[in-house]
Image: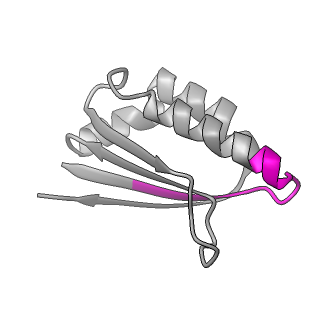
Amino acid sequence: MVKHIILWQLKDEYSEEQKKEIRKGIKEGLEGLVGKVPGLKEVHVQTDFLASSNADVMLDCTLEDEESLKGYAVHPAHVAVADSKVRPFTKTRVCMDYNID
């Protein structure tokens, strides 16, 4: 199994209300990929955070293996969500992928 963890910061130009809606769209879009992308087992998107955080959204995915991760990256359903709900609104992205038992 493989974990795929992403942290994003939203662009500064958005109001808090806009950021709330953007976070909601990211969560719905990414969590909706389960069952559509082969090898994608679980998706959890965290949008509620403490004031001490410096990220706005966290993605925590579990995939079958590294090949599934590679397929996820280019799968049309994932690309559509990334291009419409994530990339236009984010200024930074940090990723960590790792194997789990």
* Vertical order, 44 against 98 (above or below): above
Part of the protein shown in magenta: 5-19
The x, y position of residue 14, in whole percent, is 85, 51
Q: Is residue 94 a member of the stretch shown in magenta?
A: no
Which residue reaches farthest left?
A: 101
Residue 13 location, quadrant: bottom right
The structure residue drawn at horizontal position 56% and vertical position 57%, both measured from the top left corner, is 48
Q: Is residue 14 a member of the stretch shown in magenta?
A: yes
Question: On the picture, is 54 further left or further right than 89?
Answer: left
Question: On the picture, is 50 further left or further right than 35?
Answer: right
Question: On the picture, is 68 further left or further right than 78?
Answer: left
The x, y position of residue 73, in whole percent, is 44, 37
The x, y position of residue 24, in whole percent, is 62, 39
The structure residue drawn at horizontal position 28% and vertical position 60%, both measured from the top left corner, is 98
Of 59 and 83, nearer the camera is 59
Of 96 and 61, nearer the camera is 61
Location of the C terminus (image quadrant): bottom left
